[in-house]
Amino acid sequence: MSEWNELIARLTERLTADEELRLDVARELRSHLEDSADEFRRAGESPEQAAASAERALGNLDELAEQLWQANRKRMRLRGVLRWAAQTALVPLAILVILALIGEMTGRYPDYSEIPGLHHPAGILWHPDSGLTESQRFVLGGPAGATSSLEQAKAISNRWPDNPVYYGNFVAEWTKQNLDLSSKPTAEGLQAALVILERGKQLDPNNAFYDFYQAAYLAMASSDLTEEPNAGYPWANRSGGVTTRPYQQIVITDRRQFERAIAVLRSGLAKPKCAEPEIDMLRLRLDLLPPPRRIYEYLQRIVRQTQPTLFSVSHFRWLAKDVMGAGLDAAKAGRAAEAQAYLDLADRFSAFLGANAETIIQLLVARAIRADTLTHAERAYAVLGQREQAEKTHQDLLAVKAAFSNQRKQDDTLQPDPAKFGMLGYHFASGFPGRYYDPEPLRTAEHVVAMEFALVVLLAGLLFITLLWGLATLVHMFRRKENRPILVFVGWRQVGRICLYAVVLPLGVFGIYRSLSNDSNYGLVRTYGKVLLELVVLISVVLELLCCLSYSAVRRRAEELGLKVPAPIRLREWRWTVTLGVVIALVVAGYLVVSLQAGDLPRTWSTLFPLYDSKHLELYSTVGFVLSLVIAAYLVLLKLREYLGRTTGRQYRHFRRTYRRSTIPILAAAVILLGVVLGWGLAKEEAAAVGRATGAADISLSKEIAHSSYRYLKEEFVQRQRELVTQPLPAPFDKAK
Amino acid sequence: MDFSQDMVRGSIVPIVLALLNERPMYGYEIVKVVNARTGGRLEWREGTLYPTLHSLQGEGLVKASWAEAGQSPGRLRKYYHITRKGRAELARRSEEWRQFSVAVNAILLGGAL
């Protein structure tokens, strides 16, 4: 009754600091007065008398107003603090959570934009979270001003001059720049190279790497190597055809120097090892990096492993060609013993390199040297008229060829199933022999990353709505001093209900669905459409439930407070929208159920690059992709329908603003809760997967032989070297004399 | 017989808790039940009840929720429910009252303790 407005306003005047509480008490008192007046009316009083009697029954109004304030002031103070926190702290906290989530996802090396170009990633190491000391960063990236890898290597070596790995790394970089296979070294260049390599020998006396390089320099400087015209030997290529591979012919221009080259080569072969400094440096640098927790950190490790160029393999092969060319040359000149010694030396060289190989490319070069040596030896024996020896060598060559062929067949059978590869793993590590095992950890990690992206999208969507409504509320409150929207608290039970139905249940169902799906058996290259759809469904359901349940809770509370609220939405008014939603839901559910059998889908190479070529979008992923768009369009339709509906009438404007203002803390809290709980859970899952990837299943340059069928070839070389090392080293010049 | 205001005021909390222990009630209903059971002898000022209920709510002894009244659908009333803490407080106050009344009776009526 309107006559009680003034009375109630008087009683609740001191509660205006908490508008929601004031409205609540006012509504309660009004209800009491109405009940009381009804009873007086039933007792025979007129409406006016009944109203006056009800008012009198309340007692002393000033005393009551004071008592109401006293009874509620503690609560008002506490609610004031909570309201302040909800209005001012939750939204910035939600923004921080999202930023932290994105920051965490990118890992400790945030600038992963360098991955596609495979450029030097030194810049990323200056990130304060990398946890690296200044000297560690120096070893990883060199000084800040260094513009080339040679400058970096030199600076690192100068800072720690006695470290053989750092010096070896400098030598590797220096030889890359200074040993050109297309031209002879100059006398000054040769002298400089010999001095630099000599220092390497002093620092790492057991490493034949420097001896072989010295020998390569000396041999190149003292001879001219060419391919013999109109002659060659047949060699089966990968496509099944036969190519002709040339014989080497050499013209020794400085015999003394060439003899010195052979002597240095022999001294290297007497050493216990040949370690490639680039690989040692890579291993050392990888050990310096913190253990990866995120897929991007892991990919950074892979990027680093693509950087070693291992120029030494070309240079050493050239040296071997010099030696076998010299052998053939000696045979042509009738110097049988010298020819035999050169060819034995080349064979010893191949066995030594093969036994010490740490990467597949080194192993392949060792095998090529071995095959070339045998073909040159066969020719040399033929030239010398040693038919029996030539035949025996031919049989050895056939055995090597057969092994080579078997190896190729084995390679072909071990071709990876592209569908098993993760999208990132495939594009960034396709050249790695890690493809010889199931890259499950990488695949799992990228599925987790996809979910993390979805989480960020969901949270960003929620935050966008929150900020939009926050802005609208602020503008309204700034422009109008009266009839401001109220920040209502729907109660902890309602908050719990919203969390349960909108967050916990959908995520739980999604978790069960994921455990039934065999997505983790396939990389995102194959399943991206389906995964996208799954995540779009999840995001849509959570978003829509959060909005609907919040609306329902705020509407109910506003009704309790006596605000004018729209009638509850009846499904029959939304029948077309609901029907359309049900149809879409059924199609999506059908697709997802069918796609649980994803393993039966065709596997073709043409489906590998669907993101780059729309022609190759396979049906499987296209359907998922299209359905995702349909869901997004449906949600837009739903929102349009909602905002163009009758809840937007002028009479509900105050409620609408109250709804928006009151929903802001709910959505912000949802962002924080989801971000912290799910973000933490997914980060742990990703770290576990990446941990598995860096453990037994590491895609590592220095472990690639062990991960591939080439390990059998390596074993052969090791066995051969073990046999050869007991025999004296061939000495061509001694025998020639 | 009129009771002194101090006695009435002191008895409000245990009475309200005792009634809410029976079932959830709204403010006006509590007043009516008290008047009916005491034959109007307590003569509560109706307004006094609400500050008491709000204080009890602030202390966590009762909680409130709005619901439609059974006999008049569409009309919302604020129902108060006793909490677990409220029940413990009721038990404490009942025991206190029992011992207090025994002690006062012993003096005023000459009974034994």
Image (cartoon, rainbow, N blue to C red):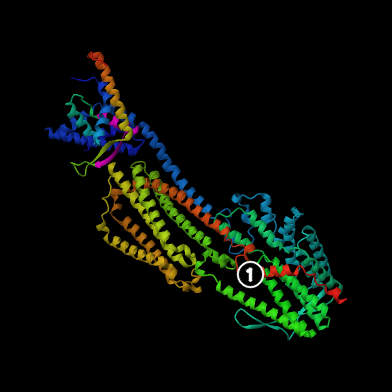
A516 in the magenta segment: no
Is residue A732 visible to us here?
yes
- From this viewpoint, which residue is outermost toward the left? A44
- In the rendered structure, which segment of residues is drawn in magenta? B47-67
Q: Is residue A343 left or right of residue A615?
A: right
Q: Is A96 above or below relative to B27?
A: below
Q: Is residue A181 left or right of residue A479?
A: right
Pick the residue in front: A279 or A710.
Answer: A710
Name the residue beneath numbered marker 1. Answer: A712
Q: How many marks?
A: 1
Residue pictured at 24% horizontal, 36% vertical: B23
x then y, percent, for residue A320: 75, 73
Residue pictured at 78% horizontal, 60% vertical: A205
Residue pictured at 53% horizontal, 65% vertical: A438
B54 in the magenta segment: yes
Is residue A352 visible to us here?
no
Q: Quadrant of the C terminus of chain A?
A: bottom right
Q: Looking at numbered disc 1 in the image, what kind of residue is underneath it?
A: Tyr
Q: Is residue B50 left or right of residue A168?
A: left
Residue A279 position by quadrant: bottom right
x then y, percent, for residue A734: 86, 73
Q: Is A74 above or below relative to A416?
A: above
SS at mark 1 in the image: helix
